[in-house]
Image (tube, rainbow, N blue to C red):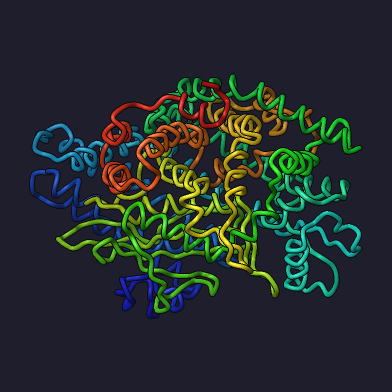
């Protein structure tokens, strides 16, 4: 059969021929690509020449490229355009892919050559990027079992295979459980308090799902979050809250409790086999944080400043609820509702006031203009690039001289085949092999409010910052300028990867940036200066509460991954103990975070969720520099592009950061910016 995934793409910029790819192409393409990858490895092993950097390390770096392409296409679509059939293929191919990687990383003959190169190469003759590749290659083999005996290697392979299947199952359970939980409102009075746009979106959702009458609220963020913020019907807020926070935790076929425990146990067993005290110790060896102790030090320091502020914030919300004749004490499902009222009372600002100024198309144009002012890059919409869903928009990215930089895919709206949340990814990376440059195919995936028959897609301010956040990741990919693909773009230490994304959020609060795109969707009037000031004034609203929440998630992640023996408690009991000091509400039965914590049990954030706060320290220090020189200062932006965005993982992140900033960061900048530390 002709398989487009295995043929040379006859598409503009070598983009993915999505419209030609069928479900039946994936498995044969992956199997064939595995075979080709194995052939690449055999050529390295059978090369009679003395092993050196070029014929071993560099050749290994370039092996299995077909497999990398095919699997990135498949797994990216499994996250944003999935189906039962696709999930079945994922379950079938994942063990084979894990086995392929394990066979390479535990190949004695191959490792012998790598070790020889590592020990005999004159590193003074290598450039910085080559040194990093050599170091990373050698360490990746050691960290993945190359030095183990045959029995332990087989055990490790079994663990890795099982973990790959469990991670997929965790994600599938979460998606399926989320999709089946819906709130259908048939009585108009139960819509009390909800903004007109949300009501219209809920009606449209009901129609899409075949409901002739009523308004359907799902657990997708664009419907769930506004419902919790605005619905005056407390019982329905409670119902939806319990549904959202019990995802994959109920007594049904999608329950993730056993999976969480098994993943945790296997990760610990794997770490112990490789000589580490815990999974966290193993992971953090390749992070800026280095050890669990340093992670806890950061989280504890932030908690020390944030918790007293959070307690006062909660007290203020309770006082408002009492004043308005609301519940005392407020419960978890009351928090968003009364905090939104408090925000409105304190700053006379809310999402409904701001949304008319944040039409999606204009915000997208604004983020493009921001990138152009900072880095000189431009975006041109292209209709000749194939896409995987009609909602996707494609752009060509060019540098200031009109040279091609990247293809950018934007996928903005929720659908049942897409998981919740927002993320950036790449269908193909960047490299400079053989005198030719492969430019990347970058994508961001979001779940924003859909346009209705009467209103365009209007974003909440949080959605605006989400778009800027993911676009920051995209810039890291699009501006990549390395030689080796595995060190290019976002291929950096995990606690460094959030710096470009979190940094971009800062521009959303600056008048110079808002003036580029924040115009009323009906009148085209620019956002009033008073509203801009209110956005800035309210930037730290609930910063104590939000910091405690993030610290709590970081500590929960670390708790699961620093256990050194089998957890004897249930998931619920373990979580309750781990989050006791950061939970600002009394314990509540029936809800659970761990069973839906896809970042750490399905994504790549295990023992790494702290990295959001770690990167915020870097980001606050970085933006302080921009504020000193001007938010659109070309010299500062160019310094950031040259030392951070274009360099990827070609050098240790702290070295790159110091080249940009001239100093190491401290938590002081973040605490000041968050309003948790007064001058």
Expressed as whole percent of the image width and height from the top left, the position of residue 310 reads 68, 27
Q: Is residue 178 visible?
A: yes
At x 26% / y 34%, what residue is drawn?
659
Q: Nearer the viewer, residue 54 or 488?
A: 488
Image: 282 above or below 111: above
Q: Quadrant of residue 597?
A: top right
At x 69% / y 75%, what residue is drawn?
453
Left or right of 395: which side holds 137? left
Image: 623 above or below 24: above
Q: Quadrant of the N terminus?
A: bottom left
Q: Nearer the viewer, residue 218 or 121?
A: 218
Expressed as whole percent of the image width and height from the top left, the position of residue 14 reads 31, 71
Left or right of 465: which side holds 496? left
Q: Quadrant of residue 448?
A: bottom right
Image: 85 above or below 299: below
Q: Is residue 161 visible?
A: no
Expressed as whole percent of the image width and height from the top left, the position of residue 444 reads 48, 58
Left or right of 210: which side holds 535? left
Q: Quadrant of residue 435?
A: bottom left
At x 38% / y 66%, what residue is drawn?
379
Expressed as whole percent of the image width and height from the top left, the position of residue 492 reads 35, 42
| Count of labels in the image | 0
At x 62% / y 39%, what residue is drawn?
538
């Amino acid at each position: 059969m002709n398989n487009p995934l295995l043929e040379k793409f006859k598409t503009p910029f070598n983009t993915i021929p999505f419209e030609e790819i069928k479900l039946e192409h994936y498995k044969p393409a992956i199997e064939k690509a595995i075979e080709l990858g194995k052939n690449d490895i055999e050529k390295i092993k059978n090369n009679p020449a003395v092993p050196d950097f070029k014929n071993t390390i560099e050749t290994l770096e370039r092996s299995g490229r077909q497999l990398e392409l095919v699997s990135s296409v498949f797994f990216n679509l499994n996250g944003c355009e999935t189906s039962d059939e696709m999930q079945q293929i994922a379950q079938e191919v994942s063990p084979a892919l894990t086995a392929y990687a394990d066979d390479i990383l535990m190949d004695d003959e191959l490792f012998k050559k790598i070790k020889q190169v590592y020990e005999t190469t004159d590193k003074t003759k290598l450039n910085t990027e080559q040194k990093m590749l050599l170091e990373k290659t050698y360490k990746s083999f050691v960290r993945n079992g190359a030095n183990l005996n045959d029995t332990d290697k087989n055990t490790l392979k079994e663990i890795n295979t099982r973990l790959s299947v469990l991670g997929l199952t965790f994600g599938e359970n979460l998606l399926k459980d989320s999709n089946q939980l819906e709130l259908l409102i048939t009585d108009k009075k139960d819509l009390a308090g909800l903004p007109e746009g949300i009501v219209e979106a809920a009606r449209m959702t009901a129609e899409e799902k075949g409901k002739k009458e009523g308004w359907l609220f799902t657990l997708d963020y664009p419907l769930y979050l506004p419902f919790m913020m605005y619905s005056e019907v407390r019982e329905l807020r409670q119902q939806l809250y319990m549904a959202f926070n019990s995802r994959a935790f109920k007594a049904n076929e999608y329950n993730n409790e056993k999976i969480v425990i098994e993943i945790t146990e296997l990760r610990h067993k794997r770490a112990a086999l490789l000589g580490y005290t815990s999974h966290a110790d193993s992971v953090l060896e390749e992070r800026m944080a280095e050890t669990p102790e340093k992670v806890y030090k950061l989280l504890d320091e932030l908690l020390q400043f944030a918790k007293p502020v959070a307690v006062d914030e909660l007290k203020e919300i309770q006082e408002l609820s009492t004043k308005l004749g609301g519940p005392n004490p407020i419960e978890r499902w009351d928090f968003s509702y009364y905090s939104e009222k408090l925000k409105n009372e304190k700053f006379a600002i809310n999402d409904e006031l701001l949304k008319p100024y944040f039409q999606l198309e204009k915000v997208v144009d604004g983020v493009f203009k921001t990138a152009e002012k900072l880095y000189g890059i431009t975006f041109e919409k292209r209709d000749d690039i194939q896409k995987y869903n009609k909602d996707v928009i494609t752009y060509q990215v060019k540098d200031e001289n009109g040279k091609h930089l990247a293809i950018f895919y934007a996928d903005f709206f929720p659908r049942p085949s897409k998981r919740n949340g927002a993320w950036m990814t790449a269908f193909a990376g960047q490299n400079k092999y053989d005198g030719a440059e492969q430019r990347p195919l970058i994508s961001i995936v979001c779940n924003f409010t859909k346009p209705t028959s009467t209103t365009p897609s209007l974003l909440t301010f949080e959605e605006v910052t989400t778009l800027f956040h993911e676009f920051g990741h995209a810039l890291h990919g699009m501006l990549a300028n390395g030689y080796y693909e595995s060190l290019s773009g976002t291929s950096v230490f995990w606690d460094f990867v959030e710096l470009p994304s979190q940094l971009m959020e800062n521009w959303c609060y600056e008048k110079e940036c808002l003036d580029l795109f924040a115009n009323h969707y009906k009148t085209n009037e620019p956002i009033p200066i008073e509203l801009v000031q209110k956005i800035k004034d309210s930037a730290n609203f609930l910063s104590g509460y939000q910091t405690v929440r993030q610290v709590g998630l970081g500590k929960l992640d670390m708790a699961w991954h620093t256990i050194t023996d089998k957890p004897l408690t249930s998931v619920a009991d373990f979580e309750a103990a781990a989050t006791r000091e950061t939970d600002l509400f009394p314990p509540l039965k029936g809800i659970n975070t761990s069973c839906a914590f896809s970042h750490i049990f399905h994504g790549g954030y295990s023992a790494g969720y702290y990295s959001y706060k770690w990167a915020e320290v870097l980001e606050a220090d970085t933006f302080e520099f921009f504020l000193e020189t001007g938010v659109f200062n070309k010299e500062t932006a160019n310094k950031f592009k040259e030392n951070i965005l274009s360099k990827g993982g070609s050098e240790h992140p702290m070295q790159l950061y110091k080249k940009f900033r001239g100093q190491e960061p401290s938590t002081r900048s973040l605490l000041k910016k968050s309003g948790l530390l007064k001058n």
